[in-house]
Image (cartoon, helix red, strand yellow):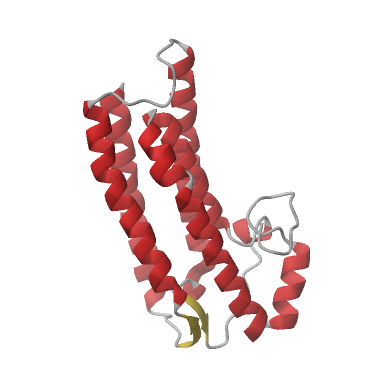
């Protein structure tokens, strides 16, 4: 089962990144100049790439020494891992839906584009930061599916913290450049988790 799950997650990550790239290319013809951006995105991107690199090395070593997250009891462990795999898959599809919904306003930087519009359709009517929600849930799902203590320590805990810092930086920029419109959006839609209307981003 370990091999199947590892290959499934690898295949899904590759396919997801290909589709994400296709979406980016589709909307690139409508690319709009950036007028404001927060430079802290470089630091946060570097931290996340470092975490992923450290995780890849540590995960390989942990597999050699069989360091697992869940107790070795069947069938409970299998059910939890299957649940994690389904959770991971749904979260990935949610990310792709979110990217498609954002269209030409997407940016890998914390940026405001010329004529910027706040998207309130699709997943953006449920939460303000659906891509970050999807990333968080996909990592948690992968942690269960991989049955990996290393993934929990290196990715599932610190990675969402960096995403929260993303949210803080982005919302600060939007509130500065589009104060009235974004404040209204904050009041209408939760930040990261549905049903929790915390104006600070969660």
Q: Can you say whether 116 is above or below 43 in the image? A: below
Q: Residue sitting at 74 percent across and 58 percent down?
A: 198
Q: Is residue 85 visible?
A: no
Q: Residue sitting at 32 percent across and 26 percent down?
A: 67
Q: Position of residue 188 (x, y in %)?
A: 77, 64
Please give the count of numbered marks on the rendered protein.
0
Q: Position of residue 112 (x, y in %)?
A: 53, 82
Given residues 143 and 187, the one toward you in this image is 143
Q: Can you say whether 53 is above or below 69 in the image? A: below
Q: Which corner quadrant holds the C terminus?
A: bottom right
Image position of 154 (left or right of 129): left
Given residues 14 and 66, the one toward you in this image is 66
Q: Can you say whether 173 is above or below 81 in the image? A: below
Q: Residue sitting at 75 percent across and 81 percent down?
A: 180
Q: Position of residue 72 (x, y in %)?
A: 40, 14
Q: Is residue 173 visible?
A: yes
Image position of 18 (left or right of 101): left
Q: Farthest top residue?
A: 74
Q: Residue sitting at 51 percent across and 59 percent down?
A: 163
Given residues 136 and 39, the one toward you in this image is 39
Q: Which corner quadrant holds the N terminus?
A: top left
């Amino acid at each position: 089962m370990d091999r199947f799950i590892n290959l499934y997650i690898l295949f899904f990550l590759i396919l997801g990144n290909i589709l994400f790239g296709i979406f980016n290319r589709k909307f690139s013809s409508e690319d709009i100049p950036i007028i404001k951006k927060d430079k802290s995105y470089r630091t946060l991107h570097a931290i996340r790439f470092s975490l992923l690199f450290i995780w890849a090395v540590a995960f390989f070593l942990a597999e050699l020494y069989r360091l697992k997250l869940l107790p070795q009891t069947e069938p409970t462990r299998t059910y939890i891992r299957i649940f994690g795999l389904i959770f991971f898959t749904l979260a990935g599809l949610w990310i792709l839906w979110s990217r498609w919904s954002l269209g030409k306003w997407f940016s890998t930087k914390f940026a405001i584009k010329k004529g910027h519009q706040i998207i309130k359709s699709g997943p953006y009517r449920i939460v303000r930061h659906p891509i970050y929600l999807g990333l968080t849930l996909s990592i948690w799902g992968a942690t269960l599916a991989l049955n990996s203590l290393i993934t929990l320590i290196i990715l599932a805990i610190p990675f969402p913290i960096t995403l929260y810092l993303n949210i803080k930086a982005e919302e600060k920029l939007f509130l500065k450049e589009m104060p009235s419109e974004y404040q209204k959006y904050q009041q209408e839609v939760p930040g990261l988790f549905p049903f929790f209307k915390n104006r600070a981003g969660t």
